[in-house]
């Protein structure tokens, strides 16, 4: 390598690890210093630049991988939110008492049923993600079967609570008229509890394999079914609050069937999909239970304090108005929850996949990127709440008066 020299004429030669041999020649005309470096020459600056370029490339790749899971999950969450809002609107058209009863029954169902089923189902997520990353297809499907069997068993005592919801709510000093309608709603919505025992694990099973677009598409179809069935049952057949509950059941049944048909016929699930049930799904539940219980506790703590607000509103003066208003308001706040929850699904899936594939550094990178995006979503949610504070309350009361 030749570099310009500021000295008048020296020539410096370095040969490997040997002693320096210095020679002086008259090279004043060219004014160059020649440095001959041995075979152990290193280029730290170039290597640092290469590492920085690779790091940027890996971060971009991870963001896209995270987005391929989180974006369809966000669409699915918004569709589910829209279905819940449609149910509240149909209940609002029936009257104040029906809207209050629907809000109270949904709150009770979330506390005693849906939060528990959803939280326990989350225990299978790290197992499925790591099984997919490690290419253990049998374990992936067996975990699905075990979780469904476990959740169906858990749903038995929950069913008992739902059948006696009127007695429980009366003990909590709720309005008798609202309580009687809430019991009717939960009685007709009871099949949905068992559907959730299949639907929640199946979503996780597909998401752990990066199959999220079909879930969003099937949720869109189920949302259309939800609107059509509610309109037919409520406005045509005049079934009242029963029709709203049955509309939820029909929509989730159609969603479950669509996802099962996709998994059975799709090439993407062909290697992992195994329809053969065996007694193995009733064994070795220990790992799932150890992971499911902490997940269930965290989900319940997150959900319950929201739903307890509905029950507390029933203790205020004018419970029909207060419970109706808080029920619609809860549907609005659910909109904000969709985005961080979808991000968390993507991050947990990516971390599990990378750990299963034996790449802990990639898993760490995915979690750090998720934390950065999570902070950004938190700031955006705060800004949205501040912006919506002027019209949020009046809108809720207006819908409650439909």
Image (tube, helix red, strand yellow):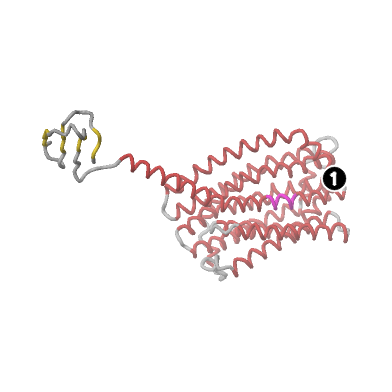
Q: Quadrant of residue 393?
A: top right
Whether the magenta-drawn stretch holds residue 81 is answered as: yes
Of residues 200 and 7, the one drawn nearer to the viewer in this rendering: 7
Q: Main secondary structure of the magenta part?
A: helix
Q: Position of residue 60 (x, y in %)?
A: 49, 47
**Residue depicted at x 20% and y 38%:** 35
Of residues 70 and 121, the one drawn nearer to the viewer in this rendering: 70
Whether the magenta-drawn stretch holds residue 374 is answered as: no
**Residue depicted at x 52% and y 47%:** 63
Question: What range of the chain is rendered magenta?
Answer: 78-84
270 on left or right of 110: left
Of residues 165 and 297, the one drawn nearer to the viewer in this rendering: 297
**Residue depicted at x 78% and y 36%:** 391
Q: Position of residue 143 (x, y in %)?
A: 53, 60
143 on left or right of 166: left
- Tag 1 secondary structure: helix
Pick the quarter of the image with the N terminus.
top left
Q: Position of residue 259 (x, y in %)?
A: 64, 63
Of residues 389 and 275, the one drawn nearer to the viewer in this rendering: 389
**Residue depicted at x 15% and y 41%:** 15
Residue 10, above or below 246:
above
Residue farthest to the front? 29
Give the residue at mark 1.
176
Residue farthest to the top? 7
């Amino acid at each position: 390598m030749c570099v310009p020299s500021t000295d008048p004429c020296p020539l410096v030669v370095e040969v490997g690890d040997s002693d320096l041999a210095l020679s002086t020649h008259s090279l004043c005309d060219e004014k160059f210093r020649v440095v001959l470096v041995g075979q152990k020459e290193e280029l730290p600056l170039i290597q640092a630049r290469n590492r920085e370029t690779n790091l940027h490339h890996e971060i971009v790749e991870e963001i896209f991988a995270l987005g391929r899971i989180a974006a369809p999950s966000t669409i699915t969450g918004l569709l589910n939110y829209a279905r819940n809002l449609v149910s509240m609107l149909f209940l609002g058209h029936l009257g104040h008492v029906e809207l209050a009863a629907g809000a109270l029954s949904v709150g009770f169902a979330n506390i005693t049923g849906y939060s528990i089923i959803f939280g326990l189902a989350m225990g299978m997520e790290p197992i499925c993600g790591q099984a997919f990353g490690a290419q253990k297809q049998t374990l992936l499907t067996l975990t699905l079967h075990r979780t469904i069997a476990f959740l169906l068993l858990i749903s038995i005592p929950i069913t008992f609570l739902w059948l006696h919801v009127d007695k429980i709510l009366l003990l909590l000093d709720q309005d008798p008229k609202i309580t009687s309608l809430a019991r009717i709603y939960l009685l007709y919505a009871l099949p949905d509890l068992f559907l959730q025992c299949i639907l929640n694990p199946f979503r996780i099973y597909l998401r752990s394999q990066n199959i999220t677009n079909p879930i969003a598409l099937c949720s869109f179809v189920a949302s259309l079914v939800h609107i059509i069935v509610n309109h037919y049952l409520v406005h045509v057949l005049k079934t009242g609050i029963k029709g709203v509950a049955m509309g939820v059941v029909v929509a989730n049944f159609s969603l479950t069937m669509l996802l099962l048909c996709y998994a059975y016929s799709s090439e993407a699930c062909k290697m992992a999909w195994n329809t053969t049930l065996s007694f193995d799904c009733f064994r070795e539940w220990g790992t799932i239970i150890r992971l499911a219980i902490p997940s269930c506790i965290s989900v319940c703590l997150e959900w319950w304090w929201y739903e307890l607000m509905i029950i507390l509103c029933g203790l205020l003066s004018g419970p029909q108005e207060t419970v109706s208003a808080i029920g619609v308001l809860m549907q609005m706040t659910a909109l904000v929850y969709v985005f961080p929850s979808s991000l968390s699904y993507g991050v947990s899936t990516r971390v599990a996949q990378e750990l299963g594939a034996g790449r802990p550094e990639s898993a760490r990178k995915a979690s750090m990127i998720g934390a950065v995006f999570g902070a950004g979503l938190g700031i955006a949610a705060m800004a949205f709440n501040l912006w919506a504070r002027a019209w949020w309350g009046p809108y809720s009361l207006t819908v409650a008066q439909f």
